[in-house]
Image: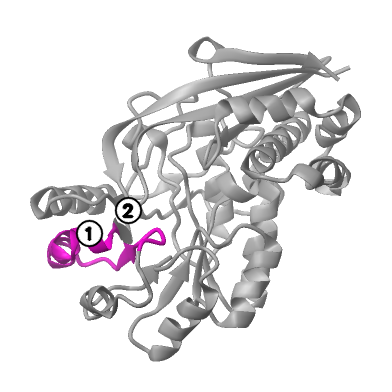
Amino acid sequence: MTELTVFAATLELRDHVAAADRTHGERTALFARAVDGDLVGWGESPLVDTTAADVLDVLAWLPDEHVAAALCDPRHDDGNESLRRASEPHAGPAHHAARALLSATALDTTLRADGRSFADELGVTDTSVGFAGVVGIEDPTRARARAQALVTLGASRLRVKVSPAHGTSALRAVLDAVEVPVVADANGSFDPDDTASLEALTSLPIAWLEQPFAVGSLQQCARLARSGQVRVGLDESVVSLDALRVLAAAGAASVVCVKPGRLGVLDALAVLHAARDLRLTAYVGGYFEAGLGRAALAPLAAIGDLDGDVVAPCTYLLADPCRLDGPRDARQPLYRGPGLGPAPDPAALEVRLERAV
């Protein structure tokens, strides 16, 4: 019998990051601990477009046999398929988050039992990886200072949040201040018919424009990509392997942001491999995770095409309950202990759900 405990933690950012759709100041993360005799595993799921209460309701509602199957070795995918079937009639962000949390916990348990790191599992031999950074919608002076600090830390690329309401002054300030590639990240905030706002962005020397339009606007993204004005990337549109294939067939983007926090760790791995087959440039994106979730991103980023959002939480959180080591010599070390990453300190977490399956 497996004892499953689900914890919650509020992660506070050192500096707020304003985007077109929300301001990231703090976020709730769920952690799961599975104990079966001497076997212990942990998983982390940052909450995006859902609440802790909704995810906990899903985890309390799922039948024991589906939860037990999901906590088995996920590399065989039987557990994932079982949980997919259980959730499919009610699929939504909370169900996806619950499945990602259980899948990560199962993978961590298996790796710890084998004494292997996630990097070992993926065959990644590098000891460290490069990393990218993000700058929120700021006034130009603050944006410039934040960008310079990130590049000094080692960021090889910057993603600057933009929106039609805020113009391009902060983006211009960052472009003038650094020599690394700069991406404009719109978080779906632009209207395809607002040609003036779009031209103000596409006239700048940005590496690409990420998620310019709302999810589902693939034809509009494809039209912008075909115009030759700018390279188009997609993030929020990358919700599944099927969605990746659809956007590739539409010619909607040449760059994709693959987020394990949205997809789940193993599904993100599958999307990264598929992106390469589809001749899309892929990088790994983050959700301001704590150290356990963030550690799992770096080995995935090592097999991607570009540096990802993998820098340790000590650079952006006031406190990391997992205490993942920070960057050294402008690179993020890969976690080489057993499991996906360092387990959190239970004393820093709040118990929210306990069940035996």
Q: Residue at x 36, y 61 (%)?
A: 189
Residue 282 % position (x, y): 53, 67
| Badge 1: residue crowd in 10 Å (few <14, some 14–19, many ≥20) | few
Residue 183: name its quadrant.
Answer: bottom left
Q: Residue at x 48, y 14 (%)?
A: 348
- Position above or below: 64 against 192: above
Q: Is the C-beta separation of discs 2 and 1 under 8 Å?
A: yes
Point out the image quarter for the N terminus.
top right
- Amino acid identity at mark 1: Ala
Q: Residue at x 68, y 69 (%)?
A: 274
Task: Determine if residue 306 is in view.
Answer: yes
Figure disc tally? 2
Observer-nearest of 101 and 179: 101
Magenta stretch: residue 155 in it?
A: no
Determine whether 316 is above or below 12 in the image: below
- Measured along the vertical axis of the image, is residue 168 above or below residue 49? below
Quick check: 60 left or right of 219? right
Q: How packed is label 2: few (under 14 Cα within 10 Å), some, or many (20 or more)?
A: some
As drawn, the residue found furthest toward the top would be 347
The answer to whether one can see residue 123 in this image is no
Residue stretch in magenta: 161-189
Q: Which residue is label 1 attached to?
A: 165
The furthest residue to the front: 193
Task: Pick whichever of labels 2 and 1 is earlier in the sequence.
Answer: 2
Residue 160, image x and y in percent? 28, 58
On whether residue 176 falls in the magenta region, the answer is yes
What is the number of the mark on residue 20? 2
Q: Which mark is residue 65?
A: none
**Image coordinates for residue 67, horizontal then vertical, percent:** 82, 30
Task: Identify residue type, mark 2.
Answer: Ala
**As rendered, which of 328 and 154 lies closer to the eye?**
154
